[in-house]
Image (cartoon, rainbow, N blue to C red):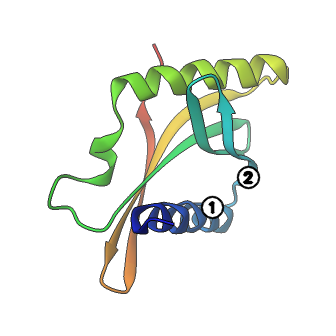
Amino acid sequence: MAQHNELGKKGEQLAVDFLIENNYAIIERNYRFDKAEVDIMAKKGDVLAIVEVKTRSTADFGNPQDFVKPKQIKNLVKAVNEYVDSNQLDLEVRFDIIAILKQKNTYDIEHLENAFYHF
């Protein structure tokens, strides 16, 4: 597996662990619909948090959260709408980003709630 794929998998697991530690229940991981993949769907109270995980080994080219692009957001919204409709969920949906930056042997984790809004 390519090194960046390993870093991405590690980042997703760190994000899941972080969410669980902060009282979120993990509902789905790597949910796919059409052209989108939702990294994590987690529930806390009456909120369904859609979490995009961005992990980087350096901030030299920008912060991890800067790599969520409009087309990706559009695809995520479409996938989440399908998921909510097909599961007949009555929850507030929030789009978050967990940005992870590897610093030598540690990882800085930043949870950005309401990181972007659906259109």
Numbered disc 1: secondary structure: helix
First in residue order: circle 2 vs circle 1: 1
Q: How many marks?
A: 2
To which residue does mark 2 refer?
Answer: 26
Q: Is residue 115 left or right of residue 90?
A: left
Quadrant of the rendering where the C terminus is positioned:
top left
To which residue does mark 1 refer?
Answer: 16
Amino acid type indicated by mark 2? Ile
The answer to whether one can see residue 49 in this image is yes
The residue lying at 59 percent from left, 36 percent from top is 37
- CB atoms of marks 2 and 1 within 8 Å: yes
Amino acid type indicated by mark 1? Val
| Residue 91 in the image, given as x and y percentages of width and height | 73, 27
- In this rendered view, identify the residue nearer to me: 7 or 62: 7
The residue lying at 31 percent from left, 42 percent from top is 67
Q: Is residue 51 left or right of residue 115?
A: right
